[in-house]
Image (cartoon, rainbow, N blue to C red):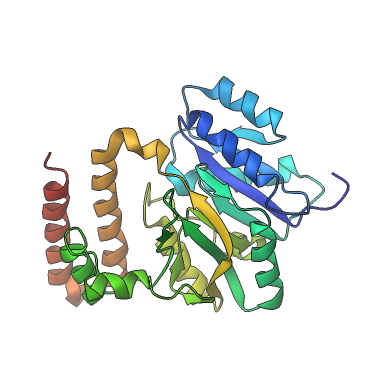
Amino acid sequence: MSARPRVAVLTVTYNTGETIRPFLESAALASDGPLPVVIADNGSDDLDALRAIAEAHGAVVVSSGSNRGYGGGIDAAFAALDDVLPDERPEFILVTNPDVVFRPGSVDELIAAADRLPRGGSFGPQILDEHGETYPSARQLPSLRTGLGHAAFSRFWPGNPWSQRYWSTTQVVERDAGWLSGACFLIRTSLFRQLGGFDESYFMYFEDVDLGQRVGRSGHANVYVPSATVVHTGAHSTSSNRRRMEVEHHRSAYRFLSRKYRAWWLWPLRVVLRTGLAVRARWVTRK
């Protein structure tokens, strides 16, 4: 590469298969500058096929050493950057799922926002689902009131006021958010390093909520940049084990809320949260 890359793309695979091909093809058009891609593999059965696809697109595959979950995989890819780009320290990293397809120029839009918003620490694009609908990827941090209302009613009443407040679905404008979806966001490399990366105690889910909270506490903003657009085609790696992922989602939700409401005198609340989330997890996985 003749120019120093400003951004390195980090992603995680686990039996992702051919999903990685359109991801890599679209990444080549996401920026006018060089965009090196580092793929951390969490122990896929098809590792040789993954390496062949990655090599054909100029990407690098590293092993995370085990199935460390999403945040752990990203941390492994980040740790490998010094070896992959020994003479080039990218200013930003783009954290993304491997089943994302970038719209042309989308990464450049995020970089432009970071250049004009120095108080911003992380920057998230508008994420569309495969039907073209906007996914609520820039949300408020969960509070007790909105969290309980969202948990109780979101399955059968998506338009309830608690979910709408939490999702912020009516605000497809550039704005600050409590956290940005881990499906795709840009973050300053120095800030990610300062924060110690993802908290790997979150195996799956809420690792992005936790990171967004820590970005805010560091004095930086999580900025939603809908002028940048990507398409998230679906959670391929979790589709074959939906029940386990639902259980993991509820477990991570309790971990986040119990840490938020950690005062000793709030122990009755933590008991209620643990019980309620356990009951809800059983209910949504009953079939």
- Please tell me whether residue 45 is drawn above or below residue 133 in the rendered image: above
Give the answer, above or below, for where 272 lies relative to 55: below
Q: Quick check: can you spot residue 197?
A: no
x%, y% of residue 111? Answer: 69, 65
Residue 88 appears anywhere in the view: yes
Determine the residue located farthest toward the right in the rendered image: 2
Q: As rendered, which of 268 and 81 lies closer to the eye?
A: 81
Task: Assign the C terminus to one quadrant of the image.
Answer: top left
Residue at 57%, 27% (x, y): give it: 50
Closest to the observer, 138 or 79: 138
Which residue is found at the position 21% from the left and 63% from the top?
A: 154
Residue visible at 29% across and 35% down in the picture:
241
Q: The N terminus lies in which quarter of the figure?
A: top right
Q: Is residue 86 left or right of residue 63?
A: right
Q: Position of residue 273 (x, y in %)?
A: 17, 64
Residue 16 rendering spot, x and y as whole percentages: 48, 32
Residue shown at the point (65%, 77%) measured from the top left: 117
From the viewer's side, name the closer residue of 34 and 279. Answer: 34
Where residue 274 sits: x, y (%)? Answer: 16, 59
Residue 80 located left or right of residue 217: right
Q: How many marks?
A: 0
